[in-house]
Amino acid sequence: MKYLRKSLFLLTLGWLGVACAMPQQDHASIRDVALTYAQTQTHSMPGKVSIQVASIDPRTALPACNALEAFMPNGAKMIGKTSIGVRCNGKPGWSVFVQVNIKVSADLLVANRPLSQGLVLSADDFTVQSGELGQTGILTAPEQAIGKTLKFAIGAGQVLRLDMLRPDFVIRLGQTVRLYVRASNFMVSSEGQAMNDATAGQAVRIKTATGQMISAFARKDGSAEVRQ
């Protein structure tokens, strides 16, 4: 029994020696791949982007790899404190997550007074202030807001976001609309008059030349389609 324990101990030491002798992936290369990926993904963001890549735990030992690839984990966002995955596409494959802090400084549109639901925004309704983007969808240029309609009321000092604005109408009340009816192997079209405003994807009622009322859905190009 003593001989068996000694043999197992020596065998374990041998395997450890082989593992230690294997080339290890340097952490600097992994961090460089994560940084390059973050720079590529954020190059179109407005304002000034600052990216900090955290150090990898020095105890993390990975086999050397010449086929590194970065990826975005499910649910992660390319802003604020987030994670970027780096994997080895060679053999043996592995993956590791790198902590990254992405800060974006830009001009923000801030309501200068309480704004009511349904208000069509003008340049007098907000001021432009420098600040840090804490999430995606924040408006950073006046032309993104001017002429748009608020979906709900907001308070003074609130930063304007895209989800606060009602999408533009693609069909307006009284407009002549091209109406499409799609069947299994053919499609017919006609013209009618819109009986309500509608954004893309919303329901719209169309009055045909014969006086028939048809329910359809507005399309991005300003036409409407009957869904079977």
Image (spheres, rainbow, N blue to C red):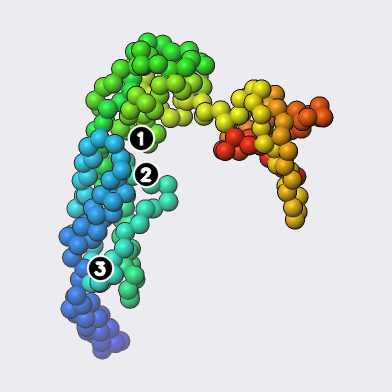
For the residues labelled 1 and 2, the Cα–Cα distance comes to 9 Å
Helix, strand or loop under label 2: loop
Q: Residue at x 64, y 26 (%)?
A: 175
What residue is rendered at 28% in x and 66% in y? 68
- For the N terminus, the quadrant is bottom left
- Residue pictured at 32% horizontal, 49% vertical: 41
Nearest to N terminus: mark 3 or mark 1? 3
- Whole-angstrom CA distance, mark 3 to mark 1, is 34 Å
Q: Disc 1 vs disc 2: Cβ atoms closer than 8 Å?
A: yes
The amino acid type of the residue labelled 2 equals Lys
Q: Is residue 82 visible?
A: no
Q: Amino acid at mark 1?
A: Gln
Q: Which residue is mark 3?
A: 62
Indicate the quadrant where residue 138 lies: top left
Circles 3 and 1: CB atoms closer than 8 Å: no
**Residue 91 quadrant:** bottom left
Element on which disc 1 rests:
loop
Which mark is drawn over residue 163? Answer: none
Q: Which mark is residue 135?
A: 1
Q: Which residue is mark 2?
A: 77
Type of amino acid at the residue the image marks with label 3: Leu
Q: Secondary structure at mark 3?
A: loop
Is 16 in front, or is 210? 210
Q: Are marks 3 and 2 in contact (CB under 8 Å)?
A: no
